[in-house]
Amino acid sequence: MSAPGIPGSSIAFFTLLAIQIGLPVEALALFVTISTFIDPIATLMNVTGDTAMTLVVAKNEKLIDLE
C-alpha cells in the first residue's frame, strides 16, 4: 500500500484505511513501526526495477550497446 515515487506515503493510505474499517489507533502505531523498516527495501526494489526496465527498453530500441 503506497504511492509510487512517494516514500512513506503508505502511512497516509493506511491511516485512511484504518479509519474506514474501524481499526484502533494502536494498529496505526504498529504499522508505522513496521513500515519504517520496510520502506527502504521497497524503495530499493522500485529503483532496481526501474533501472532494469530502462536498460531493457534502451537495448530493444538500439539506443545502448552493452557488448
Image (tube, grey):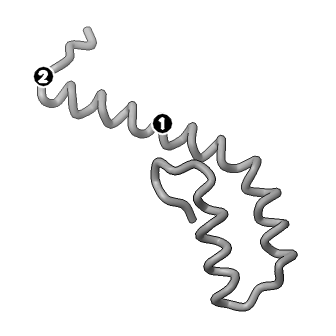
As drawn, which residue projects farthest toward the right? Answer: 26
The reply, left or right, for residue 60 in relation to residue 56 is: left
Vertical order, 26 against 57 (above or below)? below
Pick the front one: 5 or 43: 5
Residue 62, quarter of picture = top left
Amino acid beneath label 1: Val
The reply, left or right, for residue 8 in relation to residue 63 is: right
Q: Going from the N terminus, do you reach mark 2 or mark 1 first?
A: 1
Which label number is shown at residue 57? none
As drawn, which residue projects farthest toward the top? Answer: 67
Disc 1 crowd rating (10 Å Cα; few below 14, some 14-19, many 20+) is few
- The residue identified by callout 2 is 62
Locate the C terminus by quadrant: top left
Locate the N terminus by quadrant: bottom right
In the rendered image, residue 2, in percent from the top left (x then y), is placed at: 54, 61
Vertical order, 35 against 62 (above or below)? below
Per the image, label 2 sits on a secondary structure element best described as loop
Pick the front one: 42 or 19: 19
- The residue identified by callout 1 is 47
Residue at horizontal 73%, vertical 91%? 22
In the rendered image, residue 14, in percent from the top left (x then y), is placed at: 65, 71
In the rendered image, residue 27, in percent from the top left (x then y), is placed at: 82, 75
The reply, left or right, for residue 56 in relation to residue 63 is: right
Q: How many marks?
A: 2
Amino acid beneath label 2: Lys
Per the image, label 1 sits on a secondary structure element best described as helix
Vertical order, 54 against 8 (above or below)? above
Residue at horizontal 62%, vertical 78%? 16
As drawn, which residue projects farthest toward the left? Answer: 61
